[in-house]
Image: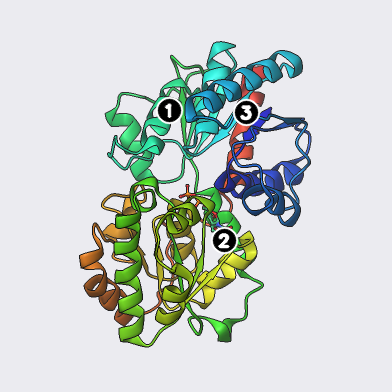
Amino acid sequence: MLIVVGARPQFIKAAALHRALVDVGGWRSTWLHTGQHHDEALSGQFFQELGLPDPDVRLTPNPASRELRLGDMMEGIRLAIDVHSPFWVVVFGDTDSTLAGAWAATARQIPLIHIEAGLRSHDWGMPEEVNRVLTDRMSSILVCPTHAAVDHLTREAILDHSTDKAMPSVRKPWVLKTGDIMHDNAIHFNAQFEADKARSGRVLMTMHRPSNVDDPTTLWSWVEAIGAWLKKCGLRAVWPIHPRTLKGLEASSRPWQERLESWGVDAVDPLGYVELLKAAHEAPLVLTDSGGVQKEAYSLGRRCVVLRDSTEWTEQVAEGQSVLCPAPAALERLADGLLEEGAFTPGALYGDGQAAQELMGKLNLMLEGLDG
Ligand code: UDP
């Protein structure tokens, strides 16, 4: 299989798949890094700490525009398919690397496995939503982390043909329900955190969605609302600042570091994965616009204010562990409410921590079925 990764959340998702591949053995995999994220903070450190293999293929797409980068990634993946002749192409999530991998596999008629298929925020203004929907249309095996994801595909008439004795294809895709592989990781690493530090530390905040951070006025209204709430509660926060958000902060003429300090916000560079999880474990509350961090909050039993008006992880909102915060003006009330409710014991929304093993088991069974 050709495994396509390129952005921070994909390195993390791939770590769970990598552990499962090592466990089951016998699979030959080629790793391709699209170069979407390429620096140490968003890429290098994850390969080391998660023990991912060095990529066999590393692309260097043109960063001058999103379109040029996407085109270069498509072309690079297509060439890698021609050289390595994979039986499957595997993509994760909803980034431009996901879409590029899907396009290249489709162009070369190689069956595509989409891990994290079927998620929908129903916000077509989000590039991630466009990437998800298009990738699902091109996929042969759609690996869904939740029942809601399966339902979305059914509603879109992407129907499951896994009972047919035929190779899955775009026309006859297989829809597999496993758990969520980011949840696998959170469970895997959570074991090492000290129980008595739970909820004893700083609030964890992360923000990097273009709609929140690209416009300095919007960014500052979020930051001011969060700062005022922290001050009111006498809490501190740790904020690993994404490079995109840093640009937004630096674009403004305000002395942002001093202002953050005055509110008790510790601005730090992007954290490694285990450090990030540890920060969530120690946080009394999580404030984020990241899909991955929302889920990690759930996996660790922390409540989470989602700094968006929609989410693709709707179940945890429906169950009340997370709440959507559509605008800074709503933050104080929503954060107060969740802080008061405290921690919870996570249920099985995202499976039992063995989603990647389950997927590999299903793929092995499928191949045996095709041989037989
Ligand atoms: N993450 C990290 N360090 C940080 C912030 C996030 O390791 O400083 C991890 C986080 O644990 C999560 C993933 O990055 O697993 C989410 O990536 P991101 O927020 O970039 O993307 P999204 O989930 O919104 O697609």
Residue sitting at x 41%, y 84%:
235
Disc 2: which residue: 186
Quadrant the N terminus occupies: top right
Local crowd at mark 3 within 10 Å, few (<14), some, or many (≥20)?
many
Query: Could you tell me the amino acid type at mark 3?
Result: Pro
Q: State the image quarter where residue 89 is shown.
A: top right
Question: 10 Å neighbourhood of mark 2: few (<14), some, or many (≥20)?
Answer: many
Q: Confirm if mark 2 falls within 8 A of ligand 1.
A: no
Q: Is residue 113 left or right of residue 192?
A: left
Q: Earlier in the sequence, mark 1 or mark 3?
A: 3
Quadrant of the image containing the C terminus: top right
- Relative to residue 183, is residue 87 drawn left or right? right
Task: Tell which tag, 2 or 3, sits nearer the viewer.
Answer: 3
Asked if residue 277 can be seen in this view, the reply is: yes
Mark 1 lies on a secondary structure that is helix
In three-dimensional space, the C-alpha distance between marks 1 and 3, rounded to whole angstroms, equals 24 Å
Image mark for residue 98:
none
Q: What x and y, as percent, mark residue 250?
A: 47, 57
Cα–Cα gap, marks 2 and 1: 25 Å
**Secondary structure state at the residue bearing disc 2:** helix
Q: Earlier in the sequence, mark 2 or mark 3?
A: 3
Q: Residues within 10 Å of mark 1 (few under 14, many from 20)?
A: many
Q: Name the quadrant containing residue 121.
A: top left
Provide the secondary structure element on which disc 3 rests: loop
Pinpoint residue 306: horizontal percent, then vertical percent. 34, 60
Task: Provide residue 366's location: percent of width, then percent of height.
Answer: 60, 27
User: What numbered label is drawn on residue 61?
Assistant: 3
Going by the numbered disc 2, the residue's amino acid type is: Ala
Q: Where residue 96 appears, x then y in whole percent?
A: 50, 32
- Residue receiving disc 1: 136
